[in-house]
Image: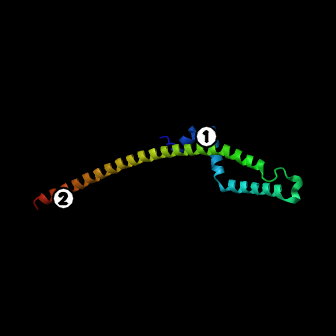
Amino acid sequence: MRPLKSWHLAHLENSSTGARIADHVAAFIGSWQFIIIQTVIFAIWVVVNTLWLLQAYQFDPYPFILFNLFMSAEAAYSSPLILMSQNRQAERDRVQAQNDYETNVAAKEEIEAILRELNRIEVDKLDRILELLRQPA
């Protein structure tokens, strides 16, 4: 008998390369690692472009117009990727909910069958006891 493939693997295999990339980018953007890296870049950018000692290296002086442009472009590209990833997550959740429902229905049917069998066994046992009691001693 061939082992059943989990719905996680089936869903992953049906995802396009672009979808998987969007999921990885969204996962990275939603991580502490990204927040820390972005904070460090922001701090270095501000320090380099504001300190008087580094005036020769200032490429984006206050009010940091280039930095604002960079952050706006980052937001413009990351927002659709995050939304695409969330839409796929919602679809995965729907598939998982349907799978869970089908599993629960099958389990309920099996439990009901077991209870019917146990009830039949109990009735047979009581019938045998009554039969033994009716027999003359």
Residue 82 vertical placement versus 42 (above, below):
above
Considering the numbered disc 2 on the image, is that residue within a helix, a strand or a loop? helix
Identity, as a three-letter code, of the amino acid under mark 2? Ile
Indicate which label's residue lies in the foreground, 2 or 1: 1
Q: Which percent across, then down, holds residue 70?
A: 74, 47
How many other residues sit within 10 Å of disc 1, few (<14), some (14-19) or many (≥20)?
some
Q: Residue furthest front?
A: 63
Q: Residue furthest bottom?
A: 137
The answer to which of marks 2 and 1 sits earlier in the sequence is 1
Q: Is 135 or 53 nearer to us in this picture?
A: 53
Q: Which percent across, then down, holds residue 49?
A: 82, 55
What residue would you read off at disc 1? Answer: 19
User: What's the residue at 74%, 49% (across, down)?
Assistant: 68
User: What's the residue at 26%, 53% (across, down)?
Assistant: 119
Left or right for 7, reference 28: left
Considering the numbered disc 1 on the image, is that residue within a helix, a strand or a loop? helix
Q: Is 132 or 11 nearer to us in this picture?
A: 11
Q: Is 25 or 48 nearer to us in this picture?
A: 48
Left or right for 27, reference 90: right
Q: Which mark, residue 129?
A: 2
Left or right for 22, reference 66: left
Disc 2 and disc 1: Cα gap in Å?
66 Å
Q: Residue furthest right?
A: 56
For the residues labelled 2 and 1, say whether their Cβ atoms are less than 8 Å apart: no
User: What's the residue at 34%, 51% (across, down)?
Assistant: 111
Q: Is 74 or 9 nearer to us in this picture?
A: 74
Left or right for 123, reference 22: left
User: What's the residue at 76%, 54% (across, down)?
Assistant: 41
Identity, as a three-letter code, of the amino acid under mark 1? Ala
